[in-house]
Image: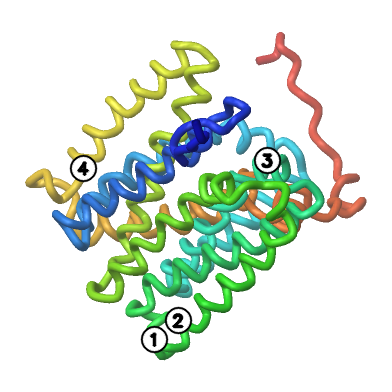
Amino acid sequence: MAFRLSPFGRDPSGNRMLSNHSLIRLACLFGVIALWRFDPTPGYVVLLAGYVHYPLSFFYAWRKIKASLTDPRKGLGTLSAIAVGIGLFWLKFPLIIFFGIHHVFNEVYLLKREICKQFGDNAGRVTTGALVINAALYCVTLRRAFPFSCLPHRMWWLVLALAAIYFISCLWPSRKRIPVRRLAALFSFELGSLAFVVLSCRYNISFYLFIVYHFFFWSLYPISSLRQRGGKQLAIYLGLHAVIVPIAWYISPYCPGHMPYQSYYDAFILMSYLHIASSFALSNAQPEWMNKLFQNPSPVPAAVQALPVAPPTPVAAR
């Protein structure tokens, strides 16, 4: 009997075709499409989810933040990243572009380990191709939104076609070593994103949907690693949600008599810039040159290192 392989099953070696990471990406993607059917511009969901996502990300990044501030070099990178975020917020740099960079880096560099494992020497080129195709899918889907609307729609379709050709050319050298179905499973999100592109031919796709996808993904993605670290860590994670969600609702304009909508929205936008900028100094889901720029910047000048530091106060004198 001929062997048939389902893309959602296992390969002949017994390995799952779709990793947990890919399954979560696809589940969140189609979850957002389902949400779009009910609310094409889910502003309420975005704001409420953001007020949950940002405090949680700060809580779990606190150790890295604390460690970076005790190291002059890393502290300089962290403060520089935060300054970039504040500056872009003050200059009203389009959040749709700033978030797009964050979104594409997350989608590609969280797969870096798997890409290196599957593609070996060709991993660098495949990573570049994945960056190009994800950026093109994002821009084409949102081509009706400013500033992408400044270019004719035909130009964006050309960009997508060229990006697809380049991406395929990056995968081509590995075609004999990696089955097509394995490639389809690895880049299932990129294939699924075509659903958004198709929908954008008839409907105006809101930028908010990409933000909701990001929040949904990061609410589910940590669960697997937390379970491996023990039930206590997972219980803490779920408990934080149980505390933060009601607070986010209570202070929102959707709860009568509390924060005005404009203030709630402005705070969300500021937190978005700070969150994205600080990720440059705290996350590894980005190009190596950004890690060097913000996480391992140039050494602090010797003159600064030589500044006298007050000795610690003896315990008995406190």
Q: Earlier in the sequence, mark 3 or mark 4?
A: 3
Location of mark 3 (residue): 113
Residue 303 relative to residue 61: left or right: right
Residue 148 appears in view: yes
Please tell me whether residue 27 is drawn above or below residue 135 in the rendered image: above
Q: CA distance from mark 1 to mark 2?
A: 6 Å
Looking at the rendered image, the disc whose residue lies closer to the viewer, 2 or 4, is: 2
Q: Earlier in the sequence, mark 1 or mark 3?
A: 3
Task: Single out the residue that lies furthest toward the left.
Answer: 256
Looking at the rendered image, the disc whose residue lies closer to the viewer, 3 or 4, is: 3
Name the amino acid type tagged 2: Trp
Location of mark 2 (residue): 157
Tell whether label 2 touches label 1 (CB within 8 Å).
Answer: yes
- In the rendered image, residue 55, in percent from the top left (x then y), is placed at 40, 38
Location of mark 1 (residue): 153
**In the image shown, does 207 or 5 lie closer to the viewer?**
5
Name the amino acid type tagged 4: Ile
Number of residues whose C-alpha sits closer than 10 Å to that of mark 3, classed few (under 14), some (14–19) or many (20 or more): few
Location of mark 4 (residue): 251
Does dot 1 land on a helix, a strand or a loop? helix
What's the residue at 52%, 57% (across, down)? 102
Residue 187 relative to residue 120: left or right: left
Q: CA distance from mark 2 to mark 3?
A: 31 Å
Does dot 3 land on a helix, a strand or a loop? helix
The colour scheme applied to this rendered structure is rainbow
Residue 150 appears in view: no
Looking at the rendered image, the disc whose residue lies closer to the viewer, 2 or 3, is: 2
